[in-house]
Each structure stands twice: as structure tokens, then as C-alpha cells.
């Protein structure tokens, strides 16, 4: 196991109905907030009115900025930064999914920063200061409710870049599973694919002596698959949503990756798909992940056998480890199919013409130095291209 230094200060308030506590949770931090949200689901569900009432009851005033789209855009982030500066706002309340929360975090880091916020993303400059962020999560998926990360699309440059800083972890996140009851099946599928990938990126590691995090990863993956299947059959099953919401948070709060080298190749490859084709992050991951597994599994066959047996329920002989590993990957593909997720780039509406460009961007060769992707196996742009081609 590797050394680690871990601090996740995000307060989690969990359970059906807890969204009505939002005013009381904001109040110790601010009297006035930027209320940030997406394309309208919170208005249709009545959540917007409930949040407004709770803020009002707690004596918290708000200025609002809606319109965040999936794969959140830099232009709206800049608008939010200008608004916070003009209105002297010190707290951003994000009500929505990963896109809204990421947009809120980018506004929070950009507002006190003198230069252009995109330079921070492009250059990875560390920030020590940011406005506080609180969240009301409406879709379990990205794990941004307690992560230190934000991922923003620069629509003019066709780039989607991530940025991480500890000050971006939300001060609180409200995880109310009842808010998920309005989610359509494809958003359940996208979310489940994303949270499973957050575990895979940590689980598939060459670091030895990590039994505890191996077991935690495996238990979380099994829980997600079990309750995702329940929700495919009964989308209004509030208990199953509670398990999924909790799992999505655990998947990306940092715990499951402690003491292990991590991978993140699939995320790196997916961000290029989202940047150029605006596909849903989870759908892109469902296409890439099995292809990545098939490309790299021979580098650590025992680990892929462990995954096949402990997570995918494969029973196999000790004399045929590669066959067991491959059966695990085949069953994962089957699970994605059950969830209605796409299995090819074509299924995402992506042709073959930009694969090389994306492979070079993913490994940063387009900007000068090459930075291989991944941890289990380092992938150069030719490897990434080969994986895109299989997809
Ligand atoms: O915009 P509205 O109208 O709210 O609709 C949203 C959106 O269209 C809808 N939705 C959300 N909650 C709903 C709902 N519809 C009905 N009922 C509800 N309760 O769902 C759609 C997708 O929302 P979005 O926020 O885009 O989804 P998600 O949470 O999957 O976020 C995806 C983004 O997170 C980034 C991804 O790259 C992507 O941009 N990620 C962020 C991470 C982080 N900050 O740590 C890590 C992840 O790996 C990921 O990269
Ligand atoms: Zn993700």
C-alpha cells in the first residue's frame, strides 16, 4: 500500500425529504447566495420552489443563474463569475447533477481569481482560495458532491478539461434519494456507468497489499449493479435509489482509492468524446471501458480474475485464468446492455474521422509534450487510437 494524506470535509446530509433543510445548512455560511441550476428539471419537479421556500424561511437571499447544460460550458461559468463579483456573493448553491455542481465550482474558483478562469484549467495552476460551494444533488453519477474536481467544456476550443483543488470540495451536500424519482432510465444508466467507472479507475491498480480497498470497491460495485437492476424493473423504488445515491457518493469521495496507484485512462479517453461530440459522460464510459479492459487485462490477469469472480460472479477453473478474466469483461458488457447503454462509438453517433485527433489530444501530444494516460498500463496515443478503433 502507498502512503496517503486524506481529508474530505464535505458534510453529507442524507435521506428522503432532507432537501428542505437547505436554508438552515446555508445560513451559517452566508446570508446571500448564487442559486445555480440546470435546464429546468428542478422547476418541473417542484424542487426549485421548495429550495426557494427553505432559503426564504432561513433568511437567505439569492441571485439566480440557471441554464447549465450537460458537459457544462465555460461561457456560463464566466457569466457566473461576473455575477458573483458584481453582486458581491461569497457562496454558490448548486442544485442539480455533476454538470451544475462542476459549473458552480468553476465559478467559485474563478470569482476571487484575478486572471481568466480557463487559464487555471489549461495550466493546472493551484488555487488556495475559492467561494464556498454547497450542493443539492438531483442525479447520482459524477460524485462531484464531495469530490475536489470540476470538469468544464471550452466550447470555442473544443476542449473538456478537469481541474482539482481541495478548496473545491463542497462544504455540504444534500443527498435526498426522493429527488431521483423523476430521472428517466437513460440518466440512471449514465449515472451507474459513471459511478462504476470511478471505482474501476481506482480498483484496476498494480499496487499490492490493498485488500481493504479491493473489498470496498467490490462491495460497492455489487451494490450498484444489484440496485440498478431493481430500478430498471421498478423506477420508483425509493429504497433502491437510496442505495444507488449512497454508492455514487462512496465511489468518488476518495476513500476507495486510498493507498493505491490509480488509473483514469478511461476518463481521459472519454473527455475527448464529450468535448468533440457532446455525448453523455456515462454513455461514453460504457463504450470505452470494456474495450480498455480487453486491451490491458493481460498486464494483470490475477486482478481481472478477482474482478470476474468477486464482482461479476464468474465461476471458472484455476487452469484457465485468461478465460475467466474475459468472461468477467463479457458479463460487464452484458450489464451495460441490460441498462440500455451503447456499446460502440457508432451507437454514440461518432464516426471514425477524428479518432487520431482525439487520441493525440487525450495524451496531450497536440499541445507539445506527450503525457501517457493510465496507471495499470501507460497508454501512448497509438494505444488510445487502437482502443478507439476497437470501439
Ligand atoms: O439540466 P436539467 O434540466 O436539470 O437536466 C439534467 C440533465 O439534462 C437531468 N437531471 C438531473 N437531475 C434530474 C434530471 N432530470 C430529471 N430529474 C432529475 N432529478 O440529467 C441530465 C444530466 O445531468 P448532468 O448534471 O449532466 O449529469 P451528471 O451528474 O452525470 O454530470 C455529468 C458531468 O459531470 C462530469 C462529467 O464530465 C460531466 O460533465 N464529471 C465530474 C466529476 C467531478 N466533478 O468530480 C467526475 C466525473 O468523472 C465526471 O467527469
Ligand atoms: Zn466520471
Image: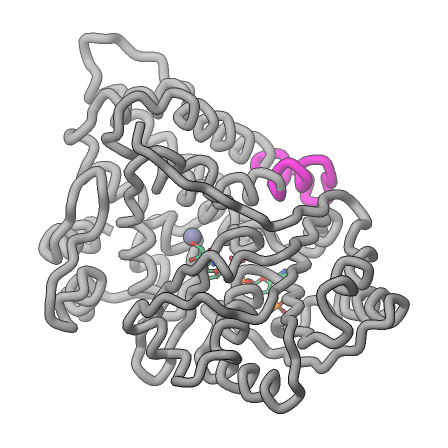
| Relative height, residue 324 to residue 58 (above, below) | above
**Residue 101 painted magenta:** no
Q: Residue 328 occupies which quadrant of the picture?
A: top left
232 horizontally vs 158: left or right: right
Left/right placement of residue 391 relative to residue 367 reads: right
Q: Residue at x 56, y 38 (%)?
A: 247
Q: Position of residue 62 (x, y in %)?
A: 75, 78
Image x and y of residue 265, in percent: 26, 49
In the rendered image, the vertical position of residue 58 relative to residue 307, given as above or below: below
261 on left or right of 220: left
Pick whichever, 271 or 389, lies toward us: 271
Q: Is residue 237 magenta?
A: yes
Q: From the viewer's perspective, is residue 255 above or below residue 71? A: above
Here the colouring is one colour
Q: Tell me if 204 is positioned left or right of 219 in this view.
A: left
First to last magenta residue range: 228-245
Q: Is residue 264 above or below residue 104?
A: above
Residue 82, horizontal then vertical, whole percent: 55, 88
Amino acid at each position: 500500500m502507498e502512503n496517503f494524506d486524506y481529508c474530505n470535509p464535505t458534510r453529507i446530509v442524507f435521506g428522503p425529504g432532507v432537501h428542505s433543510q437547505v436554508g438552515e445548512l446555508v445560513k451559517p455560511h452566508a446570508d446571500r447566495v448564487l442559486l445555480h441550476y440546470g435546464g429546468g428539471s428542478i422547476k418541473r419537479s417542484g424542487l426549485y420552489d421548495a429550495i426557494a421556500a427553505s432559503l426564504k424561511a432561513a433568511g437567505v437571499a439569492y441571485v439566480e443563474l440557471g441554464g447549465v447544460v450537460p458537459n457544462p460550458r465555460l461561457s456560463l461559468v464566466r457569466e457566473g463569475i461576473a455575477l458573483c463579483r458584481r453582486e458581491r456573493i461569497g457562496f454558490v448553491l448548486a442544485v442539480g447533477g455533476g454538470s451544475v455542481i462542476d459549473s458552480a465550482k468553476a465559478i467559485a474558483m474563478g470569482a476571487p481569481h484575478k486572471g481568466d478562469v480557463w487559464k487555471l484549467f489549461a495550466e493546472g495552476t493551484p488555487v488556495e482560495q475559492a467561494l464556498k460551494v454547497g450542493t443539492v444533488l438531483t442525479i447520482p453519477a459524477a460524485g462531484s458532491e464531495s469530490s475536489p474536481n470540476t470538469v468544464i467544456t471550452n466550447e470555442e476550443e473544443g476542449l473538456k478539461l478537469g481541474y482539482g483543488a481541495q478548496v473545491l470540495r463542497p462544504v455540504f451536500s444534500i443527498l435526498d434519494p426522493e429527488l431521483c424519482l423523476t430521472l428517466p432510465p437513460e440518466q440512471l444508466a449514465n449515472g451507474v456507468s459513471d459511478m462504476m467507472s470511478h471505482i474501476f479507475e481506482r480498483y484496476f491498480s498494480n499496487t499490492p497489499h490493498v485488500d481493504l480497498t479491493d473489498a470496498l470497491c467490490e462491495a460497492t460495485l455489487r451494490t450498484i449493479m444489484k440496485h440498478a437492476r431493481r430500478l430498471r424493473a421498478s423506477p420508483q423504488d425509493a429504497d433502491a435509489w437510496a442505495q444507488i445515491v449512497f454508492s455514487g457518493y462512496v465511489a468518488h469521495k476518495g476513500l476507495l482509492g486510498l493507498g493505491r496507484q490509480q488509473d483514469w485512462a478511461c476518463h481521459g479517453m472519454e473527455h475527448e468524446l464529450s468535448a468533440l461530440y457532446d455525448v453523455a459522460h456515462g454513455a461514453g464510459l460504457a463504450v470505452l471501458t470494456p474495450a480498455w479492459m480487453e486491451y490491458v487485462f493481460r498486464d494483470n490477469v490475477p486482478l481481472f480474475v478477482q474482478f470476474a469472480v468477486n464482482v461479476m460472479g464468474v465461476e471458472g477453473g484455476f487452469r484457465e485464468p485468461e478465460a475467466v478474466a474475459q468472461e468477467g469483461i463479457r458479463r460487464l458488457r452484458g450489464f451495460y446492455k441490460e441498462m440500455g447503454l451503447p456499446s460502440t462509438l457508432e451507437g454514440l453517433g461518432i464516426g471514425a474521422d477524428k479518432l487520431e485527433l482525439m487520441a493525440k489530444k487525450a495524451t496531450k501530444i497536440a499541445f507539445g509534450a506527450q503525457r501517457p494516460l493510465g496507471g495499470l498500463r501507460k497508454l501512448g496515443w497509438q494505444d488510445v487510437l487502437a482502443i478507439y478503433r476497437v470501439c
